[in-house]
């Protein structure tokens, strides 16, 4: 259970490339293998309180499956970050093949343990960069409206138009936007 922190806030952030070898199954296409398009990454934000740390990990993946989520939580906990929130960009051009059970293999392609290891290692690299950069941090939140989304299942169905942005800036002169 997270305890509220009233400040001062301490945070760090880091990123790492998420390499996707040629002919790797792409998330969302099951058995179809291709080359990922563009640079893919893992981004980690670590928020440190007086007696706890929590990480927010966002990955250029279709989704996080249960086995890999557990592997990431175990790896982060081993680095003194027992709380981790996992998010994914939902790209269909990201790494696949990192879950071993059905129905995940039908969505992510055949399991290859090296794909899970790649994902965990890139995440740990981003975590280390974030942890090494922890400093007093100012946190700002902004909300706005965007009208580019649509409901793909109901023509007149509900659409979430809210955009929330979190801006972090620290005493090292570094800034991040999530």
Image (spheres, rainbow, N blue to C red):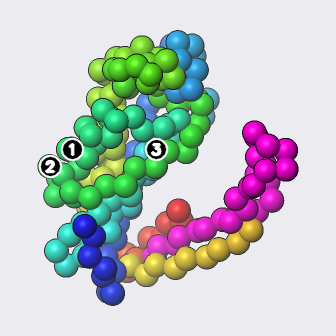
Query: What residue do we see at 34% from left, 20% from top?
Result: 100
> Which secondary structure dominates the residues rendered in magenta?
loop
The numbered dot on residue 59 is 3
The local crowd at label 1, few if under 14, some if 14 to 19, many if 20 or more residues have their Cα within 10 Å, is some
Left or right side of 69 for 161? right
107 lies above or below 128: above
Q: Is disc 1 placed on a helix, strand or loop?
A: helix
> Could you say which disc has been placed on residue 75 in the image?
1
Pointer 3 with pointer 1, Cβ within 8 A: no
Q: Is residue 151 magenta?
A: yes
Alpha carbons under labels 3 and 1: distance apart: 16 Å
Residue tagged 2:
78
As measured in the structure, the alpha-carbon distance from the residue carrying label 1 to the one carrying label 2 is: 5 Å
Q: Identify the residue shown where x is 23% and y is 50%.
A: 76
Segment colored magenta: 146-169
Q: Residue at x 85, y 44 (%)?
A: 155
SS type, badge 2: helix
Quadrant housing residue 159:
bottom right
């Amino acid at each position: 259970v997270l305890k509220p922190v009233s400040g001062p806030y301490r945070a760090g952030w880091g990123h790492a490339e998420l390499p996707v070898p040629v002919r790797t199954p792409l998330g969302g296409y099951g058995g179809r293998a291709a080359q990922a398009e563009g640079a893919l990454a893992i981004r980690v934000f670590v928020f440190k309180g007086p007696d706890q740390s929590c990480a927010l990990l966002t990955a250029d993946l279709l989704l996080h499956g249960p086995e890999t989520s557990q592997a990431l939580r175990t790896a982060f906990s081993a680095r003194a970050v027992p709380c981790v929130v996992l998010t994914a960009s939902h790209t269909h051009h990201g790494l696949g093949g990192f879950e071993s059970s059905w129905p995940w293999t039908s969505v992510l392609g055949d399991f290859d343990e090296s794909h899970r290891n790649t994902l965990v290692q890139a995440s740990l690299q981003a975590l280390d960069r974030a942890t090494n950069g922890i400093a007093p941090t100012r946190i700002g939140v902004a909300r706005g409206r965007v009208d580019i989304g649509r409901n793909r299942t109901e023509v007149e169905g509900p659409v979430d138009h809210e955009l929330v942005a979190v801006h972090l800036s620290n005493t090292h002169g570094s800034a991040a936007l999530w």
